Every structure is written in C-alpha cells, then in structure tokens.
Image: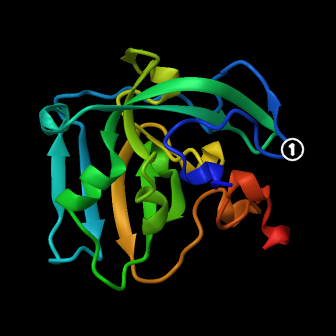
C-alpha cells in the first residue's frame, strides 16, 4: 500500500485523531498589512553558493503556477479536507536557491517574527507549495496573503502565513511553537503534536 504522504492526490481518509471542520482563520497575532511593491521572498542562510536570493512579487508571478488538492490539519484535531491550493512548487524555489549540502534544516519565517522549523526534505515533498491562491482565488489576508507555505503531511503550524524568508540551517533549531512545547517534526500521520512525544 502506498504511503498517503507521498501521493500526489489528497488521501481519501483523515489522519489519525483528526475530525472534519470548516476552514477558519487561526493564527498568532493580528493580520499584517503588506505592500506588494515592497514585499519579497528571501532565501538565505546556508545556501549552496553562499548568496542570498530575493524574489519580488513579479518574480513569483513569473514562475510556473501549480495546484495541489490538500487538506489542512490543525494540532487541535481539526482538519479541513479538499482545499485546492495554487502557487509555486516548493521544489521550484529550492531549485532557484538550493541549500548547501550540510543544510538539511530550515526556518520558514513570516511577519511579526513568527518562524517554524522544517527539513529541506519536507519542502522537497511533491505536494509542498508556496501558496498564493486558495480554491481559485488569491489568498485572503486572514489566510496568509500574499503567500503562505503549505506542507500537507505536516500540521498547519509548520506552514506559516505571510511568508517572508526561508533560512537554510546547518543544524536543527526549534521554531516559534516548537520552543513552546510543540513537536519538532509535526508529522500529521504520526500524530506528532507535542514535544513530550519526541
């Protein structure tokens, strides 16, 4: 049997411990005001060539657009199934600005200093996406406009809204919620919600 985390189609069943719920905004802090003229996505840290890459909104719009049907899973046991996310494949971004060989981890950083730790392998998942659209429309501000990270096999806190920076790391570091007792990895199919499970 195939591992549902590797399937390009959304699995027909919810992960263990989850129940279906409508999509509701859930975030730490207020919704930021973002000016697309000054917004950029920066890829920095332990990059392969030591340089920093900055993508403007126009740069992002020029990249190939893909869609992924994926549920959104919250550590509070709620899942919203069948969402259609549109944006740029995470692999496309990694190919534009690859990590150094020793950089197997990263921070995904967002407005107000929020950051989540992931592995580079998490972003290399074929369904990981730098999302700009939800169900055919541009993301609403409360859902992360202009860009959020979507990594379907991880809980929602691993995919920051209002994404600004990807920072490659040569050693593992805990992110905002991970420093506050959440699981380092956050794999939804393994129910990795809290640090005491590590």
Residue in the foreground of this view, choosing between 92 and 163: 92
104 vs 60, left or right, is: right
**Residue lying at 64% horizontally and 49% vertically, measured from the top left:** 4
Q: Quadrant of residue 182?
A: bottom right
**Residue lying at 77% horizontally and 22% vertically, measured from the top left:** 21
Look at mark 1 in the image and give the residue it sits on: 17
121 vs 178, left or right, is: left
**Residue lying at 31% horizontally and 54% vertically, measured from the top left:** 91
Q: Residues within 10 Å of mark 1 (few under 14, many from 20)?
A: some
In the rendering, at what x and y percent does residue 107 appear? 45, 63
In the rendering, at what x and y percent does residue 186 appear? 68, 58
Label 1: state its secondary structure: loop
Query: The C terminus appears in which quarter of the rendering?
Result: bottom right
Q: Quadrant of residue 33?
A: top left
Q: Is residue 154 shown to the viewer in this render?
A: no
185 vs 164, left or right, is: right
**Residue lying at 18% horizontally and 31% vertically, measured from the top left:** 61
Query: The N terminus appears in which quarter of the rendering?
Result: bottom right
Number of marks in picture: 1
Q: Quadrant of residue 39?
A: top left
In the rendering, at what x and y percent does residue 12 appear? 69, 32
In the rendering, at what x and y percent does residue 89 appear? 33, 44
195 vs 52, left or right, is: right
Q: Is residue 75 above or below residue 68?
A: below
Q: Is residue 2 above or below residue 15?
A: below
Instruction: Name the outermost residue toward the front.
Output: 1
């Amino acid at each position: 049997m195939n591992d549902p985390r590797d399937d390009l189609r959304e699995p027909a069943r919810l992960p263990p411990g989850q129940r279906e719920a409508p999509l509701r905004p859930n975030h730490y802090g207020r919704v930021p005001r973002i000016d697309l003229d000054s917004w950029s996505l920066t890829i920095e840290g332990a990059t392969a060539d030591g340089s920093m890459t900055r993508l403007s909104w126009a740069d992002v719009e020029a990249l190939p657009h893909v869609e992924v049907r994926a549920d959104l899973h919250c550590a509070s046991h709620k899942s919203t199934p069948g969402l259609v996310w549109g944006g740029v494949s995470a692999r496309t971004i990694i190919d534009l600005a690859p990590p150094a060989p020793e950089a197997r981890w990263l921070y995904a950083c967002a407005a107000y200093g929020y950051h989540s730790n992931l592995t580079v392998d998490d972003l290399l998942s074929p369904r990981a996406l730098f999302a700009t659209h939800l169900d055919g429309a541009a993301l609403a501000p409360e859902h992360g406009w202009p860009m959020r990270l979507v990594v379907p096999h991880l809980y929602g806190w691993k995919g920051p809204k209002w994404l600004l920076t990807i920072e490659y790391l040569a050693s593992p570091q805990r992110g905002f919620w991970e420093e506050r007792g959440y699981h380092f990895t956050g794999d939804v199919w393994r129910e990795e919600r809290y640090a005491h499970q590590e």
